[in-house]
Image: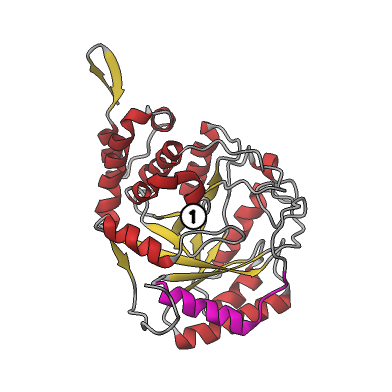
Amino acid sequence: MMIAVKGTEMTDYAVFAQKALNDEVLSRQECRALLNAPDDDLLEVLQAAYLVRSRYFGKTVRLQMLQNAKSGACQEDCHYCSQSAVSTAAIERYNLLPRAQMVAGARQAAASKAQRYCIVISGRSPLDREIDEIAGAVREIKQELPIQICCSLGLMNEGQARRLKAAGVDRVNHNLNTSESFHSSICTTHTFQDRLATIRNARAAGLEICSGGIVGMGEHDDDLIDLAMALRDVKPDSIPLNALHPVEGTPLEDCDHLTPARCLKILCLFRFLHPRTEIRIAGGREHNLRSLQPLALYPADSVFVNGYLTTPGAPAPEVWGMIRDLGFTIEVDYQPAADSLNVQR
């Protein structure tokens, strides 16, 4: 909706919030207006998004921690990824971590007040022995900690997903990453439909779905809108939004055009289009949002702690402080023991 103010037209962002609260979908024209809102309107946009966020998530924040359980040596050519076959990035490369290390990572996640611990491996698809090892680690974790477990293991069939479910895995992450039309610009070794198939297989196995995207890879506004709309069809339980952190040695190393304001507007768009879904500020938060990181929690309700796969991130105590300074609270399903890990407080 446009309103006239002193001979000019301005967008009434509160109308977007009301549509979201009424479970109405923004039109593509409204989505474009939001993405191209003047930076001077940023606080109004955030306030409108917060009306939606606060209705369904109050002032709570969910924390999640990643474990890079296998690094590098991937056969895929994903242009954004430092672990891909076309990357020459100087990263640590190793095979699947020992089971004890994966369990220790879960203890660190619990001590960091994370509600969910996500085990991630590089590669096109998991090997049978990798599924077995990860399943064994998950069983140990579930016996010791009441933490939720997410796995991000690449392309999977339904049988593999069922083995994870039987071991106690709660959720599978498999991002759509971008729009279907832009997908071949960032990856040629698998398709957008391959990614949708893995999501269907995980859901058929009874697993929750975590699926989101990466912004800032050279896509257009319509690609962002298409991604958000595709995710409405997927209906994930959680949407992680990554903002590209260009890594030297990757094909997208020079693609560094995001601004904090642009990132915040994208988060708000996803909040309006996914009012009831957990939205997580994911990789690239520190690099792209910089000093405006706290504002991202007005549209989003979840955040990663302790870094990402091959790039560093804010340690848990720093994130706790940001949440506390906003007047928000951390949502936890249990109270971790203070001495469960030597985490600085």
Measured along the vertical axis of the image, is residue 304 above or below residue 88?
below
Res. 62 visible in picture: no
| Side of 141 where 320 appears, left or right | left
Measured along the vertical axis of the image, is residue 256 above or below residue 165?
above
- Examine the image and state in which quarter residue 10 appears: top left
- Quick check: is 110 in the magenta stretch? yes
Question: What residue appears at the point 34 percent right and 47 percent down from the top-left corner?
Answer: 295
| Side of 268 where 121 appears, left or right | right
Q: Which residues are magenta?
A: 94-112
Q: Nearer the viewer, residue 324 or 77?
A: 324
Question: What residue appears at the point 45 percent right and 45 percent down from the top-left corner?
Answer: 289
Q: Nearer the viewer, residue 307 or 216?
A: 307
* Extreme residue toward the left, this view: 6
Question: What residue appears at the point 52 percent right and 55 percent down from the top-left corner?
Answer: 211
Measured along the vertical axis of the image, is residue 344 above or below residue 221?
below
Image spot of residue 145 (x, y percent):
44, 83
Residue ID for mark 1: 282
How many numbered marks are there? Answer: 1
Q: The N terminus lies in which quarter of the figure?
A: top left
Question: Which amino acid lies under the numbered mark 1 shown in the image of this protein?
Answer: Ala
Image spot of residue 308 (x, y percent):
55, 61
